[in-house]
Image (cartoon, helix red, strand yellow):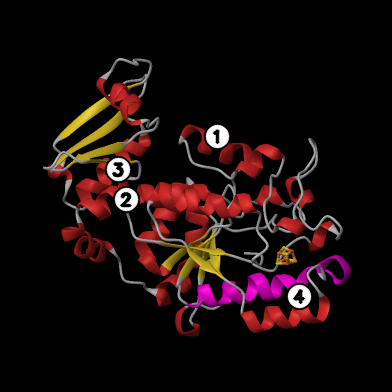
Amino acid sequence: MKIVMVKKQLLCGEPCDKCAQAEKMLRERGVWERIDEVVWAIEGEPESAGMLLGAQYGVNLAPFFVVTQEDGTEKVYRSALRFFKESFSDVSTSQSKNKQNKPRSARLDRDLPALDEKYSTRHPQEIIEWGLKWFGADCAIAFSGAEDVILIDMAVNTGLSFSVFCLDTGRLHPETYQYLETVRKHYGIPIRLMSPKADDLEDLVREKGLYSFLEDGHKQCCGIRKIEPLRRALGDCRAWISGQRRDQSPATRSDLHVIHKDEAFKGVGEGDLVKLNPLTHWTSQQVWDYIRDHEVPYNPLHERGFRSIGCEPCTRATLPGEHERAGRWWWEESTKRECGLHTKG
Ligand code: SF4
């Protein structure tokens, strides 16, 4: 087997952050020496070896990996984590386990306010790294199928274990379902889709039909399609990561914290649950700058004016100048436009 890693060299002469993080991850897992060749894609030099390889394989981001087997078959990996998992299955399990720190809930509970203060000015990448180092795969990212995909991108960059779940309400846009597949394949990660309990859903629809939220508010429908499945997902976790930001809703998220104890939900064995909001202080502009700079896949609905994406019947595109949450449950008062997934932290 021959492995070629293509790294990107920026105009300043430095490797791009993502390439440096991928190398760090491979070194930490003890497989860096098994890379046969590193080829550079030099920014502004389309004839550089890495750029030519990118054109040959139709890849326009770095790092990427080309693995050639003895029989000549080639496989290209755009995700460093997926490359690692598939190419080094002999070392992945034990190495990953060794990297996980044991949860220390008792100390953590006491230290949360101090940790929140310490990390409140840190880059989201550092906050995520802290959470994954502390909790390992017991820390889950709640992915909504919208721009919070950058949480997954940052988690992948750490090279640490994590899990991802998404609430499949059954009412998402077709574009969002397609997008979930795009993200799953792009990063080579499993996404746990949490469905509502069939009995509860059947009772609701039989009694009130498919659009009861237009008449008596979204609380009951969200409770069945989102809250209960979320409660089940979090029951397997010690911590979770959400993409909430203060600027999404001045009315309901202005006092959001970076790290706090979740007062609404319980974790494994009904134990305490820690919630991380790494994007608390980021603006929508910063999120989109990250998506563009790191070539992160995004939901195509964003290009059609959807800024905050939820269920299809309860989400609409917003007009220029409107707040992004104006497109959610627009028939209700702005102070009630939360679905109950998040309490103030
Ligand atoms: S957002 Fe709308 S369709 Fe989705 S669970 Fe809530 S009320 Fe139901």
| Residue at the disc numbered 3 | 22
Ranked by sequence position, the earlier of labels 2 and 3 is: 3
| Residue at the disc numbered 1 | 289
Q: Quadrant of residue 268?
A: bottom left
Ranked by sequence position, the earlier of labels 3 and 1 is: 3
Is 234 colored magenta in this rendering?
A: yes
Ranked by sequence position, the earlier of labels 2 and 4 is: 2
Residue in view at x 52 percent, y 59 percent = 116
The answer to whether marks 4 and 1 mark residues whose Cβ atoms lie closer than 8 Å is: no
Ligand 1: does it lie within 8 Å of the C-beta at label 4? yes
Ligand 1: does it lie within 8 Å of the C-beta at label 3? no
| Residue at the disc numbered 4 | 220
Ranked by sequence position, the earlier of labels 1 and 2 is: 2
Q: Amino acid at mark 1?
A: Asp
The answer to whether marks 1 and 2 mark residues whose Cβ atoms lie closer than 8 Å is: no
Residue in view at x 69 percent, y 45 percent = 307
Displayed-image quarter of ligand 1 = bottom right
State the extent of the magenta-drawn residues as a range: 213-235
Task: Tell me the distance, in whole angstroms, between the alpha carbons under discs 2 and 3.
Answer: 8 Å
Look at the numbered disc 4 and give the secondary structure of its residue.
Answer: helix
Q: Which residue occupies the foreground of this view, 205 or 121? A: 205
Q: Quadrant of the C terminus?
A: bottom right
How many other residues sit within 10 Å of disc 3, few (<14), some (14-19) or many (≥20)?
A: many
Residue in view at x 41 percent, y 52 percent = 155
Residue in view at x 47 percent, y 36 percent = 295
Q: Which residue occupies the foreground of this view, 339 or 197? A: 197
Is 71 colored magenta in this rendering?
A: no
Q: Amino acid at mark 3?
A: Ala
